[in-house]
Image: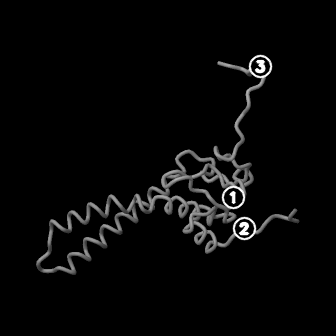
Amino acid sequence: MLDGPPSFPSPTTLFSRAVRLRCPVCGGHPIILNWFTVCPSCPVCGFRLDRHEPGYWLGSYTINLFATEGAFAAFFVGGMALFWPAVPWLGLTIGGLVTVVATPILLFPFTKTLYLAIDLAFRPPEPPDLATPIERGLVAPRTPTGAAGGNRR
Protein backbone atom coordinates (compact mmCIF):
# COMPACT_ATOMS: atom_id res chain seq x y z
CA MET A 1 0.00 0.00 0.00
CA LEU A 2 1.28 3.47 -0.84
CA ASP A 3 1.72 6.08 1.86
CA GLY A 4 0.27 9.40 0.75
CA PRO A 5 -1.09 10.40 -2.63
CA PRO A 6 0.70 9.01 -5.69
CA SER A 7 2.66 11.47 -7.79
CA PHE A 8 1.07 12.54 -11.05
CA PRO A 9 3.05 12.03 -14.29
CA SER A 10 4.68 14.95 -16.04
CA PRO A 11 3.22 16.26 -19.33
CA THR A 12 6.07 14.57 -21.22
CA THR A 13 5.15 11.22 -19.67
CA LEU A 14 1.45 11.81 -20.38
CA PHE A 15 2.14 12.49 -24.07
CA SER A 16 4.61 9.63 -24.52
CA ARG A 17 2.09 7.19 -23.05
CA ALA A 18 -0.68 8.62 -25.23
CA VAL A 19 1.38 8.20 -28.41
CA ARG A 20 1.93 4.54 -27.44
CA LEU A 21 -1.86 4.11 -26.97
CA ARG A 22 -1.53 3.49 -23.23
CA CYS A 23 -3.34 5.01 -20.28
CA PRO A 24 -1.78 8.46 -19.78
CA VAL A 25 -2.20 8.21 -16.00
CA CYS A 26 -0.57 4.82 -15.26
CA GLY A 27 0.78 3.53 -18.59
CA GLY A 28 -1.53 0.50 -18.45
CA HIS A 29 -2.93 -1.18 -21.50
CA PRO A 30 -4.95 -2.13 -23.44
CA ILE A 31 -7.15 0.94 -23.49
CA ILE A 32 -7.97 0.57 -27.19
CA LEU A 33 -10.40 -2.31 -27.81
CA ASN A 34 -10.22 -1.92 -31.60
CA TRP A 35 -9.14 0.85 -33.95
CA PHE A 36 -12.35 2.83 -33.35
CA THR A 37 -13.26 1.89 -29.75
CA VAL A 38 -11.66 3.13 -26.54
CA CYS A 39 -12.28 1.34 -23.22
CA PRO A 40 -14.58 3.17 -20.82
CA SER A 41 -11.80 3.05 -18.20
CA CYS A 42 -8.22 1.87 -17.81
CA PRO A 43 -8.14 -1.84 -16.89
CA VAL A 44 -5.12 -1.23 -14.60
CA CYS A 45 -5.84 1.95 -12.61
CA GLY A 46 -9.57 2.38 -13.32
CA PHE A 47 -9.18 5.92 -14.72
CA ARG A 48 -12.39 6.96 -16.52
CA LEU A 49 -11.22 7.77 -20.04
CA ASP A 50 -14.27 9.89 -20.89
CA ARG A 51 -13.91 11.97 -17.67
CA HIS A 52 -17.68 11.63 -16.96
CA GLU A 53 -18.51 14.34 -19.49
CA PRO A 54 -20.98 14.04 -22.36
CA GLY A 55 -19.35 15.04 -25.62
CA TYR A 56 -15.88 14.66 -24.12
CA TRP A 57 -14.36 13.24 -27.30
CA LEU A 58 -15.19 16.33 -29.39
CA GLY A 59 -11.70 17.58 -28.54
CA SER A 60 -10.10 14.52 -30.12
CA TYR A 61 -12.23 14.98 -33.24
CA THR A 62 -10.97 18.57 -33.44
CA ILE A 63 -7.35 17.42 -33.19
CA ASN A 64 -8.06 14.82 -35.88
CA LEU A 65 -9.61 17.47 -38.13
CA PHE A 66 -6.63 19.83 -37.71
CA ALA A 67 -4.16 17.01 -38.41
CA THR A 68 -6.10 16.02 -41.54
CA GLU A 69 -6.22 19.60 -42.79
CA GLY A 70 -2.48 19.95 -42.12
CA ALA A 71 -1.69 16.71 -43.99
CA PHE A 72 -3.83 17.82 -46.93
CA ALA A 73 -2.22 21.27 -47.06
CA ALA A 74 1.30 19.77 -46.86
CA PHE A 75 0.49 17.25 -49.61
CA PHE A 76 -1.12 19.83 -51.89
CA VAL A 77 1.46 22.61 -51.44
CA GLY A 78 4.32 20.10 -51.55
CA GLY A 79 2.94 18.58 -54.76
CA MET A 80 2.55 22.01 -56.36
CA ALA A 81 6.09 23.03 -55.38
CA LEU A 82 7.57 19.74 -56.57
CA PHE A 83 5.97 19.79 -60.03
CA TRP A 84 5.75 23.54 -60.72
CA PRO A 85 5.08 24.81 -63.46
CA ALA A 86 3.56 21.62 -64.95
CA VAL A 87 1.36 20.68 -61.97
CA PRO A 88 -0.59 17.41 -62.46
CA TRP A 89 -3.91 18.71 -61.13
CA LEU A 90 -5.77 15.43 -61.52
CA GLY A 91 -3.03 13.58 -59.62
CA LEU A 92 -3.05 16.19 -56.85
CA THR A 93 -6.84 15.97 -56.62
CA ILE A 94 -6.86 12.17 -56.33
CA GLY A 95 -3.92 12.22 -53.91
CA GLY A 96 -5.64 14.91 -51.86
CA LEU A 97 -8.82 12.83 -51.66
CA VAL A 98 -6.84 9.79 -50.52
CA THR A 99 -5.08 11.96 -47.94
CA VAL A 100 -8.29 13.40 -46.45
CA VAL A 101 -9.90 9.95 -46.25
CA ALA A 102 -6.90 7.98 -44.93
CA THR A 103 -5.46 10.48 -42.43
CA PRO A 104 -8.41 10.62 -39.99
CA ILE A 105 -8.73 6.82 -40.04
CA LEU A 106 -5.02 6.27 -39.41
CA LEU A 107 -4.84 8.91 -36.65
CA PHE A 108 -8.15 8.14 -34.91
CA PRO A 109 -6.93 6.23 -31.81
CA PHE A 110 -3.89 8.49 -31.42
CA THR A 111 -5.99 11.66 -31.38
CA LYS A 112 -8.22 10.13 -28.69
CA THR A 113 -5.29 9.43 -26.37
CA LEU A 114 -3.48 12.68 -27.22
CA TYR A 115 -6.56 14.74 -26.38
CA LEU A 116 -6.84 12.86 -23.10
CA ALA A 117 -3.18 13.66 -22.33
CA ILE A 118 -3.73 17.35 -23.17
CA ASP A 119 -6.75 17.45 -20.88
CA LEU A 120 -4.87 15.68 -18.08
CA ALA A 121 -1.97 18.14 -18.38
CA PHE A 122 -4.40 20.95 -17.51
CA ARG A 123 -6.87 19.04 -15.30
CA PRO A 124 -5.33 16.21 -13.22
CA PRO A 125 -7.68 13.33 -12.37
CA GLU A 126 -10.18 13.74 -9.58
CA PRO A 127 -11.46 10.93 -7.31
CA PRO A 128 -14.53 10.18 -9.49
CA ASP A 129 -12.18 9.67 -12.46
CA LEU A 130 -10.35 6.85 -10.65
CA ALA A 131 -13.06 4.25 -10.17
CA THR A 132 -13.24 0.51 -10.50
CA PRO A 133 -12.59 -0.55 -14.12
CA ILE A 134 -15.86 -0.98 -16.02
CA GLU A 135 -14.70 -2.72 -19.21
CA ARG A 136 -17.27 -5.11 -20.60
CA GLY A 137 -14.67 -7.78 -21.26
CA LEU A 138 -13.24 -7.64 -17.74
CA VAL A 139 -16.47 -7.82 -15.75
CA ALA A 140 -17.68 -11.28 -14.78
CA PRO A 141 -21.03 -12.16 -16.37
CA ARG A 142 -24.03 -11.99 -14.09
CA THR A 143 -25.52 -15.31 -13.12
CA PRO A 144 -29.27 -15.71 -12.86
CA THR A 145 -30.65 -15.91 -9.33
CA GLY A 146 -33.61 -17.81 -8.07
CA ALA A 147 -34.66 -21.42 -8.11
CA ALA A 148 -34.15 -23.86 -10.97
CA GLY A 149 -33.15 -21.80 -13.96
CA GLY A 150 -33.15 -18.32 -12.47
CA ASN A 151 -35.33 -15.39 -13.38
CA ARG A 152 -36.52 -15.48 -16.95
CA ARG A 153 -38.13 -12.61 -18.79
Residue bearing mark 1: 125
At a point 40% along the width and 65% down the height, the residue shown is 67
Q: What residue type is labelled 1?
A: Pro
**Is residue 98 found left or right of 66 in the rendered image?**
left
Disc with the residue nearer the chain's start (3 vs 2): 2
Disc with the residue nearer the chain's start (2 vs 1): 2
| Mark 1 neighbour class, 10 Å CA radius: few under 14, some 14 to 19, many 20 or more | some
Residue bearing mark 3: 148
At a point 63% along the width and 47% down the height, the residue shown is 52
Q: Residue 11 location, x and y as percent?
A: 62, 72
Disc number placed over residue 74 in the picture, else none:
none
Q: Residue 84 location, x and y as percent?
A: 15, 80
**Tag in front: 3 or 2:** 3
Q: Nearer the viewer, residue 22 or 77?
A: 22
At a point 52% along the width and 51% down the height, the residue shown is 37
Q: Residue 124 location, x and y as percent?
A: 68, 62
Marks 3 and 1, how far apart at CA: 46 Å
Q: Which amino acid does label 3 sit on?
A: Ala
Whether residues under marks 2 and 1 lie with C-beta atoms below 8 angstroms apart, the answer is: yes
Residue bearing mark 2: 8
Colouring scheme, one of rainbow, by chain, secondary structure, one colour? one colour
Q: Quadrant of residue 117?
A: bottom right
Disc with the residue nearer the chain's start (3 vs 1): 1
| Mark 2 neighbour class, 10 Å CA radius: few under 14, some 14 to 19, many 20 or more | some
